[in-house]
Image (cartoon, grey):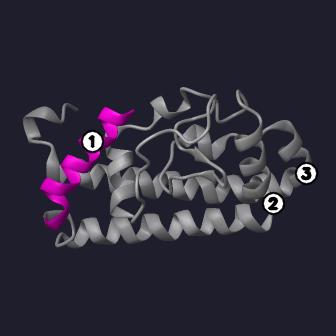
Amino acid sequence: MEERILQACEIDRLHRARILVDGHAVECLAAYRRAIWAASDAMAKLGVRAACARCGSVIPGGCCFEGMEQHIDTYALWANLLLGVRLPERAMLRGCCFFIGDHGCRLLACGAFCLNYLCDPLKAALGPDGVTHLLALVGDQISAGWEMERRLRQLVVPPADRGS
């Protein structure tokens, strides 16, 4: 993970200035930030953030198990840098995802599994309407993240390397 973080920092160093003057990239970044905050606000109001932070920092091997960080790629890490997140240099808690801290996940831009997964106790606490509402906001966040990452790749990855 440390190598991937270093790669994201290097990409940021080399390309941040170009990203921040590209109108479409700036728009995608702003839309992603809004979607993250909308989902995060709902998670806070519904008690999901507190429950996940408590569980993630207390129960090694729970949803935020060690190795879960492998689902976060270099571009998602770079997105976190663009969103103002200071990426950690080391794991804080043993037996947990590299990005779990005392107050939950230390990332803003995280993987689809991390956002979509709701354990059975949370589902029961939220009820069907709460789950539907929350997952709709999470879907908006994932979609906005995908659009932003697509724009970042368009600006950084040479056309011959993009594939299909």
Q: Quadrant of the N terminus?
A: top left
Q: Disc 3 vs disc 2: Cβ atoms closer than 8 Å?
A: yes
Q: How far apart are the alpha carbons under marks 3 and 2?
A: 9 Å
Asked whether residue 118 is in view, the answer is no
Label 2: which residue? 47
| Dot 1 or dot 3, earlier in sequence | 1
Please tell me which residue lies in front, 47 or 29.
47
Q: How far apart are the alpha carbons under marks 1 and 2?
A: 34 Å
- Residue at the image point whose x is 71% and y is 41% from the top: 56
Residue 97 vs 115, above or below: the answer is above
Q: Which mark is residue 125?
A: 3
Which class describes the residues within 10 Å of circle 1: few (<14), some (14-19), or many (20+)? Answer: some
Instruction: Pinpoint residue 2: horizontal percent, then vertical percent.
Output: 36, 35
Asked whether residue 22 is in view, the answer is yes
Say which amino acid is labelled 1.
Answer: Leu
Instruction: Pinpoint residue 59: horizontal percent, then vertical percent.
Output: 77, 34
Image position of 92 (left or right of 71): right
Q: Which segment is the magenta one?
A: 1-17
Q: Main secondary structure of the magenta part?
A: helix
Q: How far apart are the alpha carbons under marks 1 and 3?
A: 39 Å
| Dot 3 or dot 2, earlier in sequence | 2
Please tell me which residue lies in front, 139 or 69.
69
Which class describes the residues within 10 Å of circle 2: few (<14), some (14-19), or many (20+)? Answer: some
Image position of 60 (left or right of 156): right
Q: Is residue 161 magenta?
A: no
Label 1: which residue? 6
Image position of 25 (left or right of 83): left
SS at badge 3? helix
- Residue at the image point whose x is 65% and y is 36% from the top: 64
| Dot 1 or dot 2, earlier in sequence | 1
